[in-house]
Image: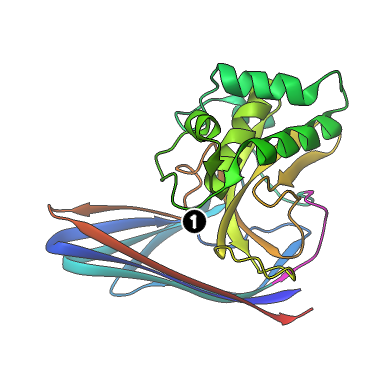
Amino acid sequence: MIFTVSHVTTYRYEVPMRSAVQSLRLFPSRFDGQRTIHWDVAVEGGVRGGSFRDGAGDKVEGWSIRGPVTEVSISVSGQVETIDNAGVLRGHREVAHPLAYLRETTATWIDDSIAALAIEAAGDVTDPLSRAHRLSRAVSEAIAYTPGRTDAQTTAAEALALGEGVCQDHAHALIAAARSLGMPARYVSGYLHARDDGESHEASHAWAELHVAGIGWIGFDAANRCCPDANYIRLGSGLDAREAAPIKGVAQGAGEEALEVTVALDAVQQ
């Protein structure tokens, strides 16, 4: 499928900031299931700095904005072609070893409830692919998709105890469950196009990738009970949502910050 993407993120400051710096991970991944036709990222009033590809193969670009800064607007526009690889990340070039993704973070901390869920889900199954599917299904059943019940700081353990959450919580819980069984797992940020069933969702999306022995990285979207297909656009990955965030920034100054995000994802060819 071919999609057009329009994504605008605006930060507004109550008091003008002296300056601002942004680190952007807003570029489509390069792998066999995805091809960028054209893509543009711009920061209004900003100066583009250096860019690089990190160990996970994701492009990161820096921007700076001189003050006084009352508003920072980051716009993304482009067109991407996708194909369905059943969630398998083929042809993605990276140098980070999968075992690096066994490291826990605050968001993916493994408590007794997560470890118990993983053990029960895996049962006596030893095949790693079957285990991964069982873990994803268990997380889907344990956490109901309920917007507004959690926030960006909610941990996997907290979402599991609550039994409710959004895609970030499903991804964190699945990552923690997989790591508890010694299976490398990571957080993925991207976009999701609306499905034929018409169920509403946010175009900005997140899911998990588990490293399956003999196959490699495979995506699992526990929030939607599936593996990513041609409706997904992959941007970047990390140990958790904070590390994989498409936008990270620092503003120099004091005062409240307001955030506004609009994302439009449209299919132009199927």
Colour scheme in use: rainbow
Using the image as rendered, state which of residue 51 and residue 37 is in the foreground: 37
Report if residue 258 is visible in the image.
yes
Quarter of the figure that contains the C terminus? bottom right
Rendered location of residue 42, percent (x, y):
41, 72
Please name the residue shown 13% across and 55% down the image.
255
Dot 1 amino acid type: Arg
Q: Main secondary structure of the magenta part?
A: loop
Number of numbered callouts drawn: 1
Identify which residue is drawn at 78% across, 33% down.
134
User: Is 171 located above or below residue 27 in the figure?
Assistant: above
* Coordinates of residue 265 in the picture (x, y in percent): 59, 74
Badge 1 is on which residue? 25
Q: Residue at x 72, y 65 (%)?
A: 231
Q: Which residue sits at x=29%, y=56%?
A: 21
**Residue at far bottom of view:** 268
Compared with 70, 245 (above or below) is above
Instruction: Pick whichever, 86 or 202, lies toward us.
Output: 202
Residue 152 in which image quadrant? top left
Q: Is residue 172 magenta?
A: no
The N terminus lies in quadrant: bottom right
Quarter assignment of residue 169: top right
Q: Is residue 269 left or right of residue 115?
A: right
Residue 34, x across and y down, in percent: 73, 63
The residues colored magenta run 81-88
Question: 10 Å neighbourhood of mark 1: few (<14), some, or many (≥20)?
Answer: many
Q: Is residue 83 magenta?
A: yes
